[in-house]
Amino acid sequence: MSQFQRFLAKRLAISIGLTLIAVSVIFVVLRLLPGSPFEALVTSGNLNQQQINEIRALYGLDQPMWRQYIDYMVSILTFQFGYSILRSQPVWDVLEPRLVNTLILLVPALVTTAILSSALGMYAGWNRGSLLEKSSIITTTFLRSTPVFITAIFFIIVFAYNLELVPAFGMRSVTASPEGYVDTFLSIDFLHHYLLPFTVAVLYYSGDFLLLARNGIVEKRGSEFLKLHKAKGLTEMQQLARAGRNSMLPILTYFALRLGMIFQGLILLEVVFGWPGIGRELVLAIQQQDYPLVQAAVFIMALAVIIANLAADVLYAYFDPTVSTGGGSSA
Amino acid sequence: MTLLDVENLKVTYTTEDDTVHAVNDVSFSIDEGVNYGLAGESGSGKSTIAEALLGLLPGNGTVERGKITFNGRDITSLSDTERRDMLWEDIAYIPQSAMDSLDPVMSTGDQIIQAIQAHRSVSDEKARSRVEELFEIVGLDPDRIDDYPHEFSGGMRQRVTIAMALALEPDLIIADEPTTGLDVIVQDKIIDKILEIQERMDSSLLLITHEIGVIAETCDELSILYGGKVMEQGSVDNVLVNPTNPYTMGLKNSFPEIDGSNEDAVAIPGSPPNLNHEPTACVFKDRCPFATDECGDSHPDLVSLPNRNHRSACHHVDKAAQMRRDAKNPETWDIPEAEDTATDTGEVVLETDNLEKYYEQSQSLLSQFRGEDPDYVKAVDGVSLSVRRSEVVGIAGESGCGKSTLGETMALLEDPTGGEFVFDGEPYEYYQNSNLEEFRRKVQIIFQDPFDSLNPRQTVRKLVGEPLTIHDYRSDEHEQAIIETLEKVGLTPAEKFLDQYPHELSGGQRQRVAVAKALVLDPDFLICDEPASMLDVSLKVNLLNLLRELADTEDIGIVYISHDLASLMQVSDRLAIMYLGRIIEEGAVDRIANQPKHPYTTSLLSAAPEKDPTTDRARVLLDGEPPDPVDLPTGCKFAPRCPKAEEECWATEPALDESEDEDHRAACYFPDDETAETAVEASQTDDPDQSTNAGSLSD
């Protein structure tokens, strides 16, 4: 086990290093942007120089750069994201609901597609050359290569306007005013709004998983150990299960990475469906140079990707006994 | 009673533009409790037969006709479910490559449990205790059933598959090349194990292999296959001692003998037949020196020879005795007799003195801080060797003994970490400082695998010409240089091969291209790392003869690295035996073959199977596996496995010149010729199969 712990410690150290680099890059890049969040206020003539200085001092922007950097690092690493400059609201209060909205849409979509498309892909790879294989590859490649907003608009036209099965826009009816997350997400109204963007997201992600799973199986088919499994008298499905287990690692890795990237939202999808997610919020914040908001949002995204990477590494070691001895004794 | 009866089996493979007739009307039958051998070169259809029996044929393979009766049931007409029930319960299978045939992400125990539970509803606990029992039987540590395949060495993995095959006590075990790719010593142990177990379980065995020696030692009856046809079949004693078919004679004669006798191996010239059409003539006609017009008309039927269990498919069975005599003579096969002139060896071209190659083991940060010395894997540990021009020096040893690393270090593909290295009068430092290119031209290396070492997207012209471009050698006569070299290695007419891609060539031709690639720069020194291990016997002998000839005519020094003692004996002038990074015995081939001094050499020599079923071989089964190269014993490295080890051996390591004989040196305190006898006695007294070591070497 000590070997596994060492492996884990090494990965953790790398992740922490990466996080520090990522937040530093965010800091530098934002400071490099021309202008400042107060530019708009200044040019409109509503503030005089004195007031500007006061506000700048309030946000600590009059401090020397290194001082700002240290304050920034300390705050952000303790998850104190501060106040949004333009919204005069704590940053977390702005981000949290948006992030939750995005995750509630994309995480189930990703999990669903990871399971369904991988299973379909494995089956397709096992029956290589079948009609199912060919058609599934063509369909998913098509869905993957079409920009997501085109698919989304197409679905809206068909299901929302022509068939009028679901609403086209938003996360809830205009009249609904639920309190708290449970109320919001456990309503028929929400489900009604949820179906269409969920379906489009599932379809959008499906291609990668299907192809990965299919290729994995195709590669493993004809390998010696499957022949032995077959000779042992295992059924086709049992053999497929073994082949699937053996080609699972790339899928797992890809899933973990995708999961990390979900925290960035799917901006185009959010825009088309009017989904109040984090992607839209981030674009807006960058436009307005709302430093604290952008910093916090980008930090969360970077952290998510790094943690997902770490998880992928650990899962890898767990699921593939050859990666580290002693790491997968019960897999 | 007949257990398995195969009648007129015909199997074809459909490829994109052709139908390959892999097995053509093969018939044989196996009685209960009998060991049956199927022998043949690659492409003879022997594995296809096994796959047809097990229903494991790939998608494009079909059983065209024929009947396979097992225990009275025709298994070609079984439904999928019925067949699945029969597999493993009645017929188990030991696959070809133990290295790849275990599921890498499932523990070995679970894989066997899976086999048991697929057929019988047994509780997990019962299945587990059965697995422990099986591990015990095959000589593995029962506590290791939760280990994964990669934690076992090659030989131990093969034991796991054997344990798996035994799990349900089947009536028939089909073993497809169970020892190919394993070292002689391990091979010997595995065969011994299979026989021992099979004796106990009283099941039948169908052994498929290209090694006639293995069949001679283990089987009662056999069939010799060629081009998907049975050439000769019957009891092992009859077929191998008195072959009546020219192919069997050729095959038998092409096995190099280990005992250093003067009968040189005689290769069968030519290559296996093209099976794109149903055979109309005798499949062996094109390569057979005794072929007449009659042979072109039809493939001969199997003719039973009177009064013995022996059948042969040849139109000229009646002339068998005459053919047997002629077949021993290379001229019969149209092979020019090699001139047996005592080769004059020239000056020393490469010399190493205490050459070392250590690999540092990764260390934890903590011990680095503490300033602890890292552990080293001593892959090459003080090797002193000199090679002269026109001399072939063989280096032999088990896998993991460091022989490949030695080859790579000699080629400076790896930087030596210690010792002296002199090539062509200049030391290692000279080449390391800016003269490496010159060295790279003069020293060439030929790798093990002719399938991987040639770029599949380059034509032969490009492959062979590439070194010329790199070294700007004979730049204005490229084409001529390429053609000359191809002809030198026997690819004639060279023009025919120039525009071919590797996949269009046969295995033997590919390896010749690899040799040509090395020779095109007129090197002074050639390092061959197991160049023949992937080739069939007849091709192997061709390559060996080619190398021998090159050494004699081109005046180059050759180092030939292999674990196959028989081929080393065939090709080398001098032999060095390696064990754990050190040379433990060195001397002229004849001396080593006839009077080995080191007990390790003795056991290596005795492990090679004997192709003559009438001779009995004294088996020296070595204990365990080589020790962990990181944590070596202080004294003689071989002491833990040595039957003769005494206190002195454990205390200090013997030097190579212990035996005070300049021409035949051995690092042993007790070198004598009694070794063989004492070793046998020792191995009989204690259980030879206590493999407890994971053998981290092979991982």
Image (cartoon, coloured by chain):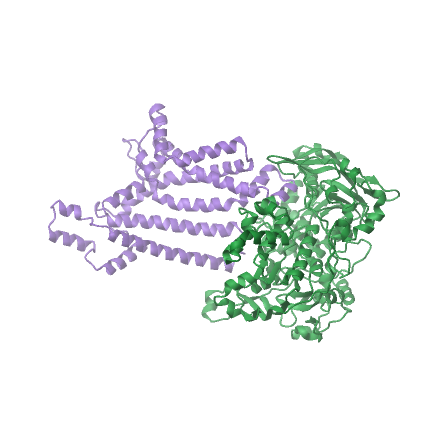
Chain colours: A purple, B green
- Quadrant hosting residue B116: top right
The location of residue B685, given as percent across then percent down, is 77, 64
Residue that lies at the very extreme toward the front in this rendered image:
B476
Judged from this view, the residue extending furthest toward the top is A162
Front residue of this view, candidates B665 and A207:
B665
Front-most of B571 and B158?
A: B571
Observer able to see residue B298? no
Q: In this rendered view, identify the residue nearer to me: B526 or B248.
A: B526
The answer to which image quadrant residue B61 occupies is top right
Indicate the quadrant containing the N terminus of chain B: top left, top right, bottom left or bottom right.
top right
Compared with B332, A70 (above or below) is: below
Quadrant containing the C terminus of chain B is: bottom right
Q: Residue furthest right?
A: B307
Name the residue: 54% across, 71% down.
Answer: B427
User: Residue B378: image x %, image y %?
Assistant: 57, 67
- Does B16 appear above or below A73? above
Q: How many numbered marks appear?
A: 0
